[in-house]
Amino acid sequence: MTSDNIALLYPVFFGIWILLTLLSAGFLFFNKNAALKRRIWPAFVISIGVLFLAFTAARGTPPQSLLVIAPVIALITFLNLRLIKFCDSCGATLTRQSRSAKSASCPKCGAAL
């Protein structure tokens, strides 16, 4: 990839990243349908990981570096899928800060999880 193409890649990457951030924040904050969130969240998180890896590869990262970066992206994707849950009662997006701290109730509405 030429340096002109790489220079164009960064604004495109950041524009897409900002758009996805705004759309996902709006969806997670305003949508109260936990079942819909559970259905869309895995595809979204995996797509973000693939997109980030594709941009990393497109900017000319050496293949040896991609062998380190890809597992890191996979780990982050796995943790996002594992640690983010949705309350059935109010639809709140719940994040666990650690593996051992498992809540018994929703901090927003108090419903049992």
Image (cartoon, grey):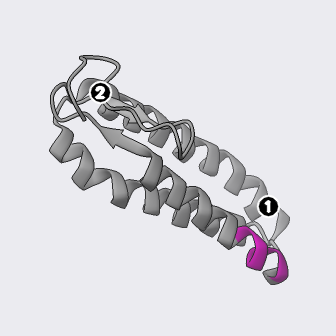
Q: Which residue is mark 1?
A: 4
Does residue 22 belong to the magenta stretch? Answer: no
Helix or strand or loop: what does disc 2 sit on?
loop
Q: Residues within 10 Å of mark 1 (few under 14, many from 20)?
A: few
Q: Amino acid at mark 1?
A: Asp
Q: Amino acid at mark 2?
A: Ser
Q: Whole-Å distance between the Cαs marked 2 and 1?
A: 52 Å
Q: Is residue 35 left or right of residue 26?
A: left
Q: Which of the pair 88/9 is nearer the observer?
A: 88
Q: Residue at x 51, y 61 (%)?
A: 78
Q: Position of residue 64 (x, y in %)?
A: 83, 82
Image mark for residue 113: none
Is residue 96 something that shows in the picture?
Answer: yes
Image vertical order of residue 80 relative to residue 60, above or below: above
Q: Which of the pair 38/43 is nearer the observer?
A: 38
Helix or strand or loop: what does disc 1 sit on?
helix
Image mark for residue 105: 2
Q: Which of the pair 101/17 is nearer the observer?
A: 101
Quarter holding the C terminus is top left
Q: Position of residue 103 (x, y in %)?
A: 38, 32
Q: Position of residue 105 (x, y in %)?
A: 29, 27
Image vertical order of residue 95 relative to residue 13, above or below: above
Q: Residues within 10 Å of mark 2 (few under 14, many from 20)?
A: few
Does residue 68 belong to the magenta stretch? Answer: yes
Image vertical order of residue 32 relative to residue 39, above or below: above
What range of the chain is rendered magenta?
64-69
Mark before the other along the chain sequence, 2 or 1: 1
Q: Are marks 2 and 1 in contact (CB under 8 Å)?
A: no
Predominant secondary structure, magenta span: helix
